Image (cartoon, grey):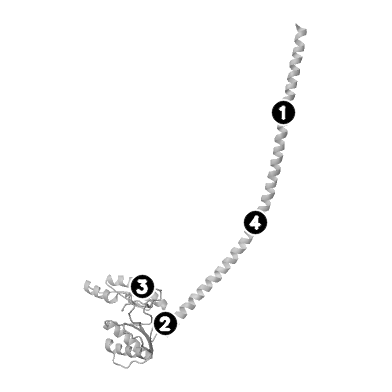
Amino acid sequence: MATKEIPVREFIREMMDVQAKAYRTVVEMLVNDVKAELGLLKNEVNDIKTSLQFSQKDVDEIKEKLTGVDEKIEAQSDLVEGALGDLGKVIEKADDLENRSRRNNIKVFGIPEESSEDYAASEVKLKAAIVDKLGIKDEIVIERAHRVGPKDGGRKTRDGTRRKNPDEPRPIVAKLLNWKQKDAIIQAARKSRPHGVSFRDDFSDRVLAKRASLIPDMLAARKEGKQAFLVRDRLVIKKLSKPPDDAATAKLNDQERISSNISDNEVFIKE
């Protein structure tokens, strides 16, 4: 019995050795495949690292260039800001000079206009209105007087819109030789508030736009019982000792209301 068991054991041992070698071979093959894959991955990682290094270099160069551009933009912005500031000052000075040149001017609305009216006819009508509406009988010396605005019936305002009443006469702008006479006309118009005709100072477009923007605040202040009036492009508000009654306020608002028919972006308001 002992002699038969030995070959079986050897056979089993040999079979186990063969099996172990087969497993070893399979494992080695798998390991080699894994190593090969890892090698490829490593190469790819190295390639990516190299690429990233170049990319980072490019990014750094771009950042450096952008920094330079930002500095140039900032410098140009400072120059532009300074130029805008200077331009604003120039515009203010030009506007001040324009208003000074208009200092002796009056602008009159409501005087009937004829189709063939010339400068001389406009001057005659203006002088007659000063006498009839304001009661000023002194001889007014007018350097020149003329209608302003488009002459066509559609008659657009400066903002491009058409006036509601196309038959409304154009205003007359007149330059007086004597500033005291001009001021006397404006003061007389403020006191008498002549019906149908409005005598006003002649301002630049910038001042007119500013005055128009202040109208709502002025009317609101008057409704609160305060004295409110415009001085060139400023709103002056003073508190009254005795608020006006409702009837007086209504009359004031009616007299001071804004007329949508006035051309040249003007505000129809009597101070």
Q: Is 76 placed above or below 137 here?
A: above
Residue topped by disc 1 = 26
Kind of residue sitting beneath label 1 = Val
* Residue 242 in sight from this viewpoint: no
Spot occupied by residue 269 in the image (x, y as percentages of width and height): 32, 77
Please state which of the two labelled residues, at mark 2 or mark 1, is closer to the viewer: 1
> Is the C-beta separation of discs 3 and 2 under 8 Å?
no
Residue 99, disc: 2
Which of pointers 2 and 1 lies earlier in the amino acid sequence?
Answer: 1
The answer to the question of whether label 2 and label 1 lie on touching residues, with beta carbons closer than 8 A, is no
Residue 251 appears left or right of 216: left
Q: Which residue position holds label 3?
A: 214
x and y percentages locating residue 24 in the rendered image:
73, 26
Helix, strand or loop at label 3? It is helix
Q: In the drawing, does residue 13 fall left or right of residue 103?
A: right
Report the residue that reaches farthest toward the bottom. 139
The kind of residue tagged 3 is Leu
